[in-house]
Structure formats: C-alpha cells, structure tokens
Amino acid sequence: MAAYYINSYDIIDMALFSQYPPKVIVLLEKYGATVIASDLEGIAVEGSPRMMNAIIRFPSTEAALQCYQDPDYEPLKILRQQATRNCTMVLVKAFNPS
C-alpha cells in the first residue's frame, strides 16, 4: 500500500536550501517515490502556515522508511535541517476504505 510523506517547514537560507531538491530527487527515484506536490505558496486554511509544503508518494511505508534511513540521505537531511526550521515530517498510509 502506498505511503506519503507530508512535509512542512520554513526555509531560512534559500541559497543553501536550493542545493537540496536536485540531490534528494535522485534518492527518491531509487525508492520509487514521486513528488505529488511541492509549493512555496501553499494556503493555510487552518493552523499555522509554513513556507514550504510537499507531499511525496512512496510505493510502501517500508520504502519510505528505507529512504529516510538511507546513509545517502544523512548529509541531505543535515543540509535540509541547516536551511530550514519548524519542520514537520509525517508519514501516512494511503486511505484504504475496505
């Protein structure tokens, strides 16, 4: 069953952050992931808005966790953490009504 990372954070260093997307895309492809949405202009209809919001689809929860735990992601995670603040990253399973 598919799983989705839902990410929200504020970018505090755009020059540093700009290095993150092209590098992380390569890693996402390794795990069969697809960026469903990525937006610097999301509209908060409730709660506190963040500057960056993204939804990334993985073929399974296992693939999503393997990607996050991949040693190649560690330097990218540090890069993202240095360039952002107020990060929330949630992994949710696809809805299955049955």
Image (cartoon, grey):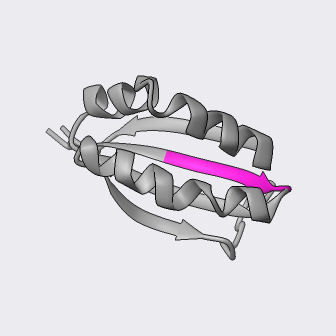
For the point 77% across and 64% down, the residue is 15
Specify whether 5 is left or right of 19: left
Stretch in magenta: 6-12
Could you say which is closer to the camera, residue 6 or residue 18?
Answer: 18
**Above or below 96: residue 51:** below
Quarter-of-image position of residue 66: top left
Specify whether 77 is left or right of 33: right
Task: Give the total number of marks visible in the rendering.
Answer: 0
Specify whether 3 is left or right of 54: left
Q: Quadrant of the C terminus?
A: top left
Quarter-of-image position of residue 27: top left
Q: Determine if the magenta segment contains residue 22.
A: no
For the point 48% across and 53% down, the residue is 23
Most common SS among magenta residues: strand
Could you say which is closer to the camera, residue 17 or residue 32?
Answer: 17
Q: Determine if the magenta segment contains residue 10.
A: yes
**Above or below 67: residue 54:** below
Could you say which is closer to the camera, residue 9 or residue 21?
Answer: 21
For the point 40% across and 26% down, the residue is 70
**Above or below 66: residue 46:** below
Quarter-of-image position of residue 11: bottom right
**Above or below 73: residue 24:** below
Specify whether 52 is left or right of 47: left
From this viewpoint, is residue 86 visible?
Answer: yes
Q: Picture coordinates of residue 14 (x, y %)?
A: 78, 64
From this viewpoint, is residue 84 visible?
Answer: no
